[in-house]
Image (spheres, rainbow, N blue to C red):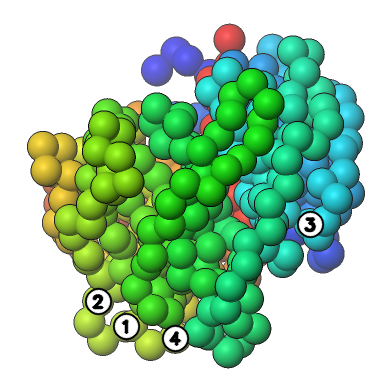
């Protein structure tokens, strides 16, 4: 494969990490090699603009923007406060005009404008979730862990694992304002953590952290407030492994034929086949990741290798994946990195 790729890894910097780690990727061999590290406080979540020209990162001060050089190097543009506690997730509108920060600690959604040169602009809206949850150690209060636009971008879906809800907001693409439209109420004490859509936009997959399962929804934008319909509920761990385990990360393969979930505590990845016609999942296997707390997983562009960011194990482990056999085989030694939290991959020009 002649294309070149770079991987960026966000981390917590209270130990030895200094910021965002940059890795050169050898897609054919299924390995990554650290090139450098860009200093920034606690880049716990990073993402790319849809143009691929800019990178955005959570930081202690709010959110930071970077331009990306042709070789993948980063140039810091600006830092903007989100007027609240440090966020945990970023999503960006398809036209790269708005950026939304999800707040775990304060249960707040913050919408900021984006400038054409990639810089972050002003806050356009702020919404605090309200309500009581049912988990005592979560302090019975809202914790927004993830937000994602519906494929048509009419709605912003905000996963709140503190109150077991996914709040649906109408999003005004001119003003950057949010208006509550509807609520998907997840199962009691399920803690909906993450939501992704199939490539064709017909199905949504919601990872429920504390119940260790995935809720599958069909999505039809023309069906009003019934546009989401629950069609499947499937476990992420083996029957004997539901205690002391928490579903952590969810990703679709690039082909869309498979879905992979990581499980903390259990320290496994579970592989599913995807029925593209019905959207439903079939569990193939659940195998160990050789690392502690696989908080985030990613897959190589050729769908032949997966990477596990093991937050508590301070490592990245890489596996050759055989979807047809439901098998992962460790590919080379672990890579040591302090508190890896998530990863994005960019194709270089």
Element at badge 4? loop
Relative to the observer, which residue lies in front, 135 or 18? 135
Looking at marks 4 and 2 on the same chain, the residue that comes earlier in the sequence is marked by 2
Using the image as rendered, state which of residue 203 and residue 78 is in the foreground.
203
The relative height of residue 95 versus residue 214 in the rendered view (above or below) is: above
Single out the mark in the foreground, 1 or 3.
3
Residue where numbered disc 2 is placed: 238
Question: Which badge, 1 or 3, comes first in the chain's sequence?
Answer: 3
Q: Looking at the image, do the residues carrying marks 4 and 2 touch, with CB atoms under 8 Å apart?
A: no
What residue is disc 1 on? Answer: 241
Residue 347 at x, y percent in the picture: 53, 20
- Label ID, residue 244: 4
Q: Marks 4/3: CA distance?
A: 27 Å
Q: Residue 338 falls in which quadrant of the image? A: bottom right
Which residue position is annotated with label 3?
86
Name the residue at 87% across, 44% down. 81
User: In x, y percent, where is residue 268?
Assistant: 38, 68
Label 4: few (<14), some (14–19) or many (≥20) C-alpha neighbours in 10 Å: few
Tag 1 secondary structure: helix
Q: Quadrant of the C terminus?
A: top right
């Amino acid at each position: 494969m002649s294309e070149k790729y770079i991987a960026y890894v966000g981390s917590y910097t209270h130990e030895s990490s200094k910021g965002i780690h940059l890795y050169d990727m050898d897609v054919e061999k299924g390995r990554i090699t650290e090139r450098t590290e860009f200093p920034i406080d606690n880049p716990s979540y990073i993402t790319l603009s849809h143009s691929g020209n800019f990178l955005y990162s959570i930081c202690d001060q709010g959110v930071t923007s970077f331009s990306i050089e042709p070789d993948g190097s980063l140039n810091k543009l600006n830092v903007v406060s989100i007027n609240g506690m440090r966020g945990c997730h970023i999503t960006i509108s398809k036209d790269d005009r708005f950026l939304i920060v999800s707040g775990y600690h304060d249960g707040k959604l913050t919408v900021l404008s984006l400038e054409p040169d990639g810089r972050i602009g002003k806050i356009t809206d702020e919404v605090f979730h309200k309500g009581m949850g049912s988990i005592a150690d979560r302090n019975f209060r809202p914790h927004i862990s993830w937000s994602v636009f519906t494929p048509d971008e009419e709605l912003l879906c905000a996963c709140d694992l503190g109150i077991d809800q996914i709040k649906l907001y109408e999003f005004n693409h001119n003003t950057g304002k949010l208006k509550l439209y509807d609520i998907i109420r997840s199962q009691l004490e399920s803690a909906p953590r993450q939501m992704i859509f199939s490539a064709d936009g017909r199905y949504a997959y919601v990872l429920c952290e504390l119940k260790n399962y995935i809720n599958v929804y069909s999505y039809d934008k023309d069906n009003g407030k019934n546009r989401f319909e629950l069609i499947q509920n499937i476990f992420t761990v083996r029957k004997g492994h539901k205690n002391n385990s928490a579903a952590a990360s969810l990703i679709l393969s690039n082909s869309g034929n498979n879905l992979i979930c990581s499980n903390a505590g259990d320290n496994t990845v579970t592989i599913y086949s995807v029925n593209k016609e019905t959207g439903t999942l079939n569990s193939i296997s659940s195998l160990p990741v050789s690392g502690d707390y696989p908080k985030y997983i990613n897959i190589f562009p050729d769908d032949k290798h997966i990477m596990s960011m093991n937050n508590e194990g301070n490592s990245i482990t890489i596996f050759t994946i055989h979807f047809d056999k439901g098998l992962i085989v460790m590919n080379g030694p672990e890579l040591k990195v302090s508190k890896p939290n998530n990863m994005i991959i960019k194709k270089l020009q």
